[in-house]
Amino acid sequence: MGEVLVITSGKGGVGKTTTTANIGTCLAMMGHRVVLVDADIGLRNLDVVMGLENRIVYDLVDVAHGRCRLRQALVRDRRFEGLFLLPAAQTKDKTAVTPEQMRELCQELKKNNDYVLVDCPAGIEQGFRNAIAGADRAIVVTTPEVASVRDADRIIGLLEASELRDISLVINRIRPKMVKKGDMLDVEDVIEHLAIELLGIVPEDELIIISTNKGEPAVLNSHSKAGEAYRNISKRILGEDVPFMNLDESPGFMSRMKRLLGFRTG
Amino acid sequence: MLEILSRIFGKEASQASKNVARERLRLVLMHDRLEISPQIMEALRDDIIKVITNYLVIDEGATEIAFERGKNSMALVASIPVLKMKRIPQKKDTG
Ligand SMILES: Nc1ncnc2c1ncn2[C@@H]1O[C@H](COP(=O)(O)OP(=O)(O)OP(=O)(O)O)[C@@H](O)[C@H]1O
Ligand SMILES: [Mg+2]
């Protein structure tokens, strides 16, 4: 029996889809059976980030309404054994799926897969409630900005209210230079306010855009710092104790950071 | 000392931006988290009244409590019209 993880944020555009694609790809790369579910109905994205947009036949709504079998709707990623995508529908009706249907779907997918990653839409409406319905764990993504952290706080409250207690945080798009200059909230600031477990920190990385252009998640690029961050995150999901990565080139700064943040070193 | 140095080097403005963000985040979260349900607010009001009426006779109907948001702080403000003081029996050592 596998696990269902929902990747959510509240605020839009902070990196949910990027995070879903990279963690999913990495887990598959490490030999696990993974299904990525695009729950952003009407704004299908995950297919493009994964480079699978040309192979879609059926979608999530087709499955929910019994227009096809679940197996028929899963797009197999040919790069890895055991990596699949269940695409979102492009229908305008966002209420085309109910939380009950999503729960059943996740339950079904869990049977034959190790990890089911659900890419949540922005917002706190029906789409959000659908996406979290079948989840065992939640990963909240935020950027180090006031509005984004605020929305993350709101989402954490809603997750807890819906009995989802296993929640961890990914802080995305950190710019070490700006943090150093005192122009960006640092990891400590965010954690202090949200008071949940830190799963990972991902730097701002131009290679993310290049990888999205190509439809090849950054974890496949050994030069990408963000890719490295997502590889670490994937290992932590598997229960490994991986130290948080050095986001800065200068060693003096990092040792200060580590002291400041009480990071595990190594 | 450090502060003076950084001011000399003109870093002061940029140092402030993260601190400004942190302070704004603190306030905005406090405010969001205070948006508690009317039921809880009602319960809080009832409890406050219960305690106060041990000492004072107040106009319960006119009693109001609310969170007030200042620029840099948050306060629980209560307006409780007092009708009269109660005679509070002094405890005496009566052996
Ligand atoms: N670490 C990063 N470095 C640089 N660019 C990034 C990073 N993370 C995400 N981006 C870019 O930010 C944009 C938004 O990312 P993404 O689509 O993953 O966010 P989202 O939370 O899924 O958005 P939505 O709420 O619209 O679904 C994309 O263009 C993506 O390439
Ligand atoms: Mg998205």
Image (cartoon, coloured by chain):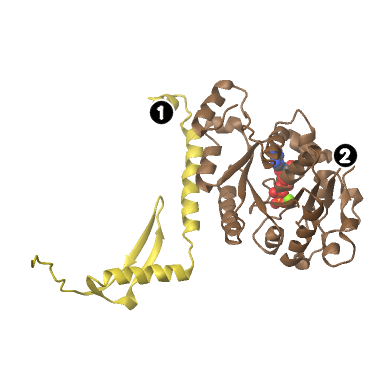
Chain colours: A brown, B yellow
Residue A57 seen by the camera: yes
Picture coordinates of residue A242, whole percent (x, y): 64, 33
Q: Residue at x 46, y 45 (%)?
A: B23
Task: Please name the residue that numbered disc 2 is placed on.
Answer: A79
Picture coordinates of residue B42, whole percent (x, y): 42, 71
The disc numbered 2 marks a residue on which chain? A
Instruction: Classify mark 1: helix, strand or loop.
Output: helix
The disc numbered 1 marks a residue on which chain? B
Q: In terms of image quadrants, where is residue B3? A: top left
The quadrant of the rendering that contains the C terminus of chain A is: top right
Question: Are discs 2 and 1 located on one and the same chain?
Answer: no
Ligand 1 within 8 angstroms of badge 2 C-beta: no
Instruction: Classify mark 2: helix, strand or loop.
Output: loop
Ligand 1 within 8 angstroms of badge 1 C-beta: no
Q: Residues within 10 Å of mark 1 (few under 14, many from 20)?
A: few
Report the amino acid beneath label 2.
Answer: Arg
Q: Nearer the viewer, mark 2 or mark 1?
A: 2
Task: Please name the residue that numbered disc 1 is placed on.
Answer: B3
Picture coordinates of residue A199, whole percent (x, y): 62, 41
